[in-house]
Amino acid sequence: MYHLPGITPEAPTLEFATGGREVKKHVKLDDAALRRSYDTLNYHKTDRVDMVYLGCPHLNMVDILKLSQKLDGKKCKVPLWVMTAPWIYTQAKKLGYVEILEKAGVKVFSGACLAALGAVPDGVRSIAVDTAKQAYYITGCYVDDPLEVCYGSSDDCVDAALTGVWRGEWR
């Protein structure tokens, strides 16, 4: 884990984040380093997307609300799986968000993770994700025959779910 002083809630200051201990390593993130990371997380040969996966870490209620607003009245062209915590799922269902998502063709799961399940549906060779964590973990499930991974923003992933095409790009 890491703290960004003044950004992450647990780290209002550097001294608070480190508990007064000396910082052992400083890491400078510039545009070139971020671009290298982005390129490393995108390992796909095609712009075709067979599946989209959101929720690693699990989506929170605000994420579920925003996703339901983006997909209300629309239909996904490729499978879109969403993972959330059980208590969030229960509340999202009560508020009607799960119904909106399911009408759009989304499968909403709770209390699990695609990497923990260790499988994607048959025929999936290219998957779009919006977190570096998932881009990294999903490859561990398919070491002998790795999935192609498209990594980008949540909006890039929603677009891919609706079109079946990856159009995400470095920003």
Image (tube, rainbow, N blue to C red):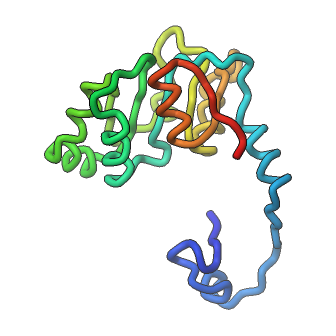
Give percent across and percent down for residue 133: 60, 45
| Residue 44, position as x, y percentages in the image | 71, 23
Quadrant of the rendering where the N terminus is positioned: bottom right
Q: Is residue 84 left or right of residue 146?
A: left
Image height of 123 relative to 68, above or below: above
Judge whether 160 appears above or below 56 on screen.
above
- Judging depth in this view, the residue of 81 and 99 nearest the camera is 99
Q: Is residue 35 left or right of residue 46?
A: right
Q: Which of the two residues, 124 or 156, is positioned nearer the viewer here?
A: 156
Residue 84, horizontal then vertical, whole percent: 36, 44
- In the visual, does 47 lie left or right of 98? right
Can you tell which quarter of the image residue 73 is in?
A: top left
| Residue 17 place in picture, x, y as percent | 62, 81
The picture quadrant where one finds residue 31 is bottom right
Residue found 47% across the figure and 25% down from its top = 161
The residue lying at 42 percent from left, 47 percent from top is 58
Left or right of residue 142: residue 23: right
